[in-house]
Image (spheres, grey):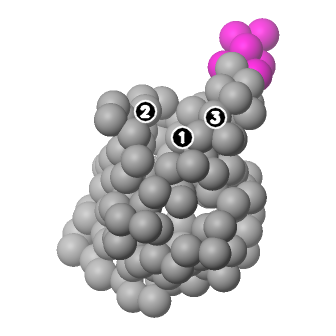
């Protein structure tokens, strides 16, 4: 079992963040541009823990540094299936994190709840960046 899957299933945001490379790039299923960097990616993942209901991984596929973690979840009463595509660097940290979801009704519900989280995500990421510079 991939360590990220273990951290998610334990709902351990700190363990999830510890598995991210500083230069990780997060590609959201509902945003046009990728989000670069550990602070914003960790904040997005904490938001996901807050908004996903009935989350569970149902399949894991691994090929060297590439991993696909298929999941099911509910958001705002909409059930959907998704996949976390992870790539790990030479240090075993996630440097590329892409999420895809289906169907469109689930993606739309996810977009709405994550948009409501955006201000908090931005504040958490900024606080983490400021904490590093001190």
- Residue 109's x, y, as percent? 53, 60
Say which element carries label 2.
strand
Up/down of 52 relative to 32, above or below? below
When asked about the image quadrant of residue 101, the answer is bottom left
Mark 1 nearby-residue class (10 Å; few <14, some 14–19, many ≥20): many
Q: Earlier in the sequence, mark 2 or mark 3?
A: 2
Mark 3 nearby-residue class (10 Å; few <14, some 14–19, many ≥20): some
Q: What stretch is highlighted in magenta?
A: 127-134
In the drawing, does residue 68 fall left or right of residue 28?
A: left
Answer whether residue 119 is visible to the viewer in this image: yes
Alpha carbon of mark 3 to alpha carbon of mark 1: how far?
Answer: 12 Å
Q: Extreme top residue here?
A: 134
* Residue found 46% across the figure and 57% down from its top: 108
Dot label at residue 41: 1
**Residue sitting nearer the eye, 75 or 131:** 75
Up/down of 31 relative to 124, above or below? below
Dot label at residue 35: 2
Is there CB contact under 8 Å for labels 1 and 2? Answer: yes
Residue where numbered disc 3 is placed = 118
Say which element carries label 3.
helix
| Between marks 2 and 3 in the image, the one whose residue lies nearer the viewer | 3
Provide the major secondary structure of the magenta segment.
helix
Answer whether residue 83 is visible to the viewer in this image: no
- Residue 100's x, y, as percent? 34, 61
* Residue found 63% across the figure and 57% down from its top: 48
Alpha carbon of mark 2 to alpha carbon of mark 3: how far?
Answer: 12 Å
**Residue sitting nearer the eye, 112 or 93:** 112
């Amino acid at each position: 079992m991939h360590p990220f899957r273990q951290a998610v299933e334990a709902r351990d945001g700190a363990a999830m963040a510890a598995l991210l490379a500083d230069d990780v790039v997060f590609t959201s299923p509902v945003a046009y541009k990728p989000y670069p960097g550990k602070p914003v990616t960790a904040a997005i993942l904490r938001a996901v823990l807050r908004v996903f209901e009935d989350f569970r991984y149902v399949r894991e596929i691994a090929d060297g540094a590439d991993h696909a973690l298929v999941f099911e979840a509910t958001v705002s009463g909409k059930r959907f299936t998704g996949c976390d595509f992870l790539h790990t660097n030479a240090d075993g940290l996630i440097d590329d994190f892409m999420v895809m979801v289906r169907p469109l009704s689930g993606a739309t519900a996810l977009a709405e709840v994550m948009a409501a989280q955006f201000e908090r995500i931005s504040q958490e990421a900024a606080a983490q960046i400021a904490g590093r510079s001190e």
